[in-house]
C-alpha cells in the first residue's frame, strides 16, 4: 500500500514538474518566436523581395514557428510523438475535408504571389470592392477603402474574380461628359472646353492632346466628351478640375443647360424648365 502511494506521489510530482516546465517553455518560447519574427522581417533576405511576397513569407514563418513551439510543449508533457503524428494525420484529413474553402484560399494566396496581378499599395477593384491592397496573407488579402474601411477578402475568391488595377500604368486618361442646350453652337462650346483644359497644368500633351468634341445628342441636349491624359497620381485632381473649370467657363459664357421636360397631370402635356 505504501509503495502504491509512493508511486502515485512520484507520478504527481513528475506531472506537476512537466506542466510547470511546459509553461516556462511556452512563455519563453513565445517571446523568442516574436523576436525571431521581428529579426526575420528586418533581415536583408526579405528587404530585396516584393511587398506581397514578403507579407506571404512572414505569415508562413509565423505559423511554422508557433507550430514548432506547440510540438515542443506537447513533447515536454510526455505525449508520445507517434500518438501526435497519428492525431495530426487524422486531424489533417478531417480538416482537409471540412475546410476545402480554406485550402482553396491557400492555393489562391500562392497564385497571387506567383502571378502578381497587383502589388501591395496598388489601388484595385475586385469582388465589388475598390481600395488599396495592404496585405496578402496565407488565406486572405486585406483591402482598405477610400473611406478607411478594412475589408478582408479570401484569396480563393480573389483569384476567381476580375481584378482591375488602377495603379498598374504610369499614365491614365480622365474622361467627362457634359451636356448643353440643343440651340448652342457646338464649335463655340468646344472652344470653351479646350481653353478651360489648357488652364489645367497637370494635363499632359501626350500620348494624345486634350480632346473635346460633340459626341451625341438627344431631343433637348447636345452631348460633349472631353478626354485628357495625366500622371496616374494626378488622375483625381485632373478629373475634378475638368468638371469645375469647364462648368465655370460655360456658365461665364452664357452656355445654357438642357431644358428639363416635366410631364403634366394628364401625362401628355409638357412644360420646359431651365436647369
Image (cartoon, rainbow, N blue to C red):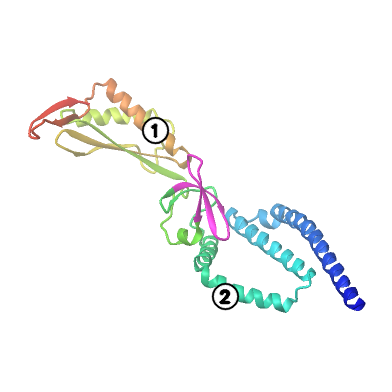
Q: Is residue 16 visible?
A: yes
> Which residue position holds label 1?
240
Q: CA distance from mark 1 to mark 2?
A: 56 Å
The location of residue 94, given as percent across then percent down, is 56, 73
Q: Residue at x 79, y 69 (%)?
A: 76
User: Which of pointers 1 and 2 lies earlier in the amino acid sequence?
Assistant: 2
User: Residues in magenta?
Assistant: 130-153
Towards the viewer: 266 or 217 = 266
Q: Residue at x 64, y 62 (%)?
A: 60
The location of residue 201, given as percent across then percent down, is 43, 31
Secondary structure under the numbered disc 2 in the rendered image: helix
Asked if labels 2 and 1 touch by Cβ distance under 8 angstroms, the answer is no
Towards the viewer: 42 or 229 = 42
Instruction: State the predominant SS element of the stretch in magenta.
Output: strand
> Which residue position holds label 2?
93
Secondary structure under the numbered disc 1 in the rendered image: helix
Towards the viewer: 253 or 114 = 114
Quadrant containing the N terminus is: bottom right
Q: Is residue 166 visible?
A: no
The location of residue 37, given as percent across then percent down, is 71, 56
Q: Residue at x 24, y 21 (%)?
A: 254
Quadrant containing the C terminus is: top left
Quarter of the image where one finds residue 29:
bottom right
Towards the viewer: 122 or 190 = 122
The location of residue 87, given as percent across then percent down, is 65, 75
Amino acid at each position: 500500500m505504501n509503495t502504491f502511494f509512493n508511486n502515485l506521489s512520484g507520478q504527481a510530482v513528475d506531472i506537476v514538474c512537466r506542466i510547470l516546465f511546459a509553461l516556462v517553455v511556452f512563455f519563453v518560447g513565445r517571446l523568442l518566436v516574436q523576436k525571431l519574427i521581428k529579426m526575420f522581417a528586418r533581415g536583408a533576405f526579405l528587404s530585396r523581395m516584393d511587398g506581397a511576397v514578403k507579407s506571404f513569407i512572414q505569415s508562413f514563418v509565423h505559423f511554422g514557428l508557433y507550430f514548432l513551439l506547440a510540438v515542443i510543449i506537447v513533447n515536454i508533457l510526455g505525449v508520445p510523438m507517434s500518438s501526435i503524428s497519428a492525431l495530426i494525420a487524422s486531424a489533417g484529413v478531417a480538416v482537409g475535408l471540412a475546410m476545402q474553402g480554406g485550402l482553396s484560399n491557400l492555393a489562391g494566396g500562392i497564385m497571387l504571389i506567383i502571378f502578381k496581378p497587383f502589388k501591395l499599395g496598388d489601388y484595385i477593384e475586385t469582388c465589388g470592392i475598390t481600395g488599396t491592397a495592404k496585405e496578402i496573407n496565407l488565406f486572405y488579402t486585406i483591402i482598405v477603402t477610400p473611406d478607411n474601411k478594412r475589408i478582408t477578402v479570401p484569396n480563393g475568391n480573389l483569384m476567381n474574380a476580375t481584378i482591375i488595377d488602377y495603379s498598374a500604368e504610369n499614365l491614365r486618361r480622365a474622361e467627362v461628359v457634359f451636356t448643353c442646350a440643343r440651340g448652342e453652337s457646338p464649335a463655340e462650346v468646344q472652344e470653351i472646353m479646350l481653353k478651360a483644359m489648357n488652364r489645367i497644368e497637370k494635363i499632359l500633351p501626350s500620348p494624345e492632346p486634350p480632346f473635346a468634341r460633340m459626341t451625341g445628342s438627344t431631343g433637348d441636349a447636345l452631348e460633349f466628351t472631353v478626354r485628357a491624359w495625366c500622371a496616374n497620381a494626378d488622375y483625381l485632381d485632373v478629373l475634378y478640375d475638368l468638371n469645375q473649370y469647364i462648368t465655370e467657363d460655360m456658365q461665364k459664357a452664357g452656355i445654357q443647360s438642357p431644358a428639363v421636360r416635366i410631364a403634366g397631370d394628364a401625362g401628355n402635356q409638357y412644360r420646359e424648365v431651365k436647369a
